[in-house]
Image (tube, rainbow, N blue to C red):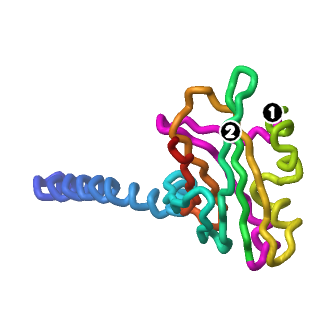
Amino acid sequence: MDSSPAKVTLTRRGYWLSMAALVVAVPAALAAQTWGSIKDWRSQHLRQPVSGTLGQPIDYAGASWTVTRLTRLAGKGSTVFLAEFEALAADPKALGAVPCQVRLSDESGREWQPTLFADPVVTQQYPDVRNRSLCGGVAFAATEPGKPARMAASFLIPPGASSLTLSIALYSALPDYLSVSEPQT
């Protein structure tokens, strides 16, 4: 058995070089394996707003979108926020297959999902809203080319919520999403 100092030094050097290579190789392999997951996560969480103004059309996701009304309604113990919007698409059937997400947020970062017109205040004061779909498939599938798909969403929010922003995101257009803020009175 050869245990000369030169042989021991070479063995130790090889060991430490192997360890250094692992420190570089393992994270690189993990990054390469998870790149698709990172891109998916980024498209769902890191989004870029396409700012719009109430009543003004804006091009987003292959359609001309207009948020037609943002209304606060007094409910029982809470406030109902009604958002009405429409999209004019050259091919509404194509957008009908794209999932859509609508949400409302305030200046402090709180978010609310639509409530499907559960509050009777909405249907009493705006009965035409009952005939509108939420954003996405059904709204576009029932629309003829050249006519706008009319949609609406209502949200139950705390009475003190302020500086509200409506967000509409079609998954095919992420990371971009449509963002319209409530006009300040």
Q: Residue at x 64, y 70 (%)?
A: 61
Q: Which mark is residue 137?
A: none
* Residue drawn where x is 82% and y is 43% of the image: 126
Dot 1 lies on which element?
A: helix
Which residues, given as a range, are shown in magenta?
A: 90-118
Reading the image, the residue beneath label 2 is 81
What residue is drawn where x is 60% and y is 49%?
166
> Any mark on residue 121, and which?
1
Left or right of 163 on screen, residue 86: right
Q: Is residue 26 left or right of 67 when viewed as pictured?
A: left
Q: Are marks 1 and 2 in contact (CB under 8 Å)?
A: no
Q: Earlier in the sequence, mark 1 or mark 2?
A: 2
| Image position, residue 40 (x, y; %) | 57, 59
Residue type at mark 1 is Val
Kindly report the distance in space between the C-alpha atoms of the residues bearing marks 1 and 2.
10 Å
Q: Position of residue 121 (x, y in %)?
A: 80, 33
Magenta-drawn stretch contains 151:
no
Q: Is residue 73 visible?
A: yes
Q: Position of residue 89 (x, y in %)?
A: 73, 74
- Identity, as a three-letter code, of the amino acid under mark 2: Phe
Q: Is residue 101 magenta?
A: yes
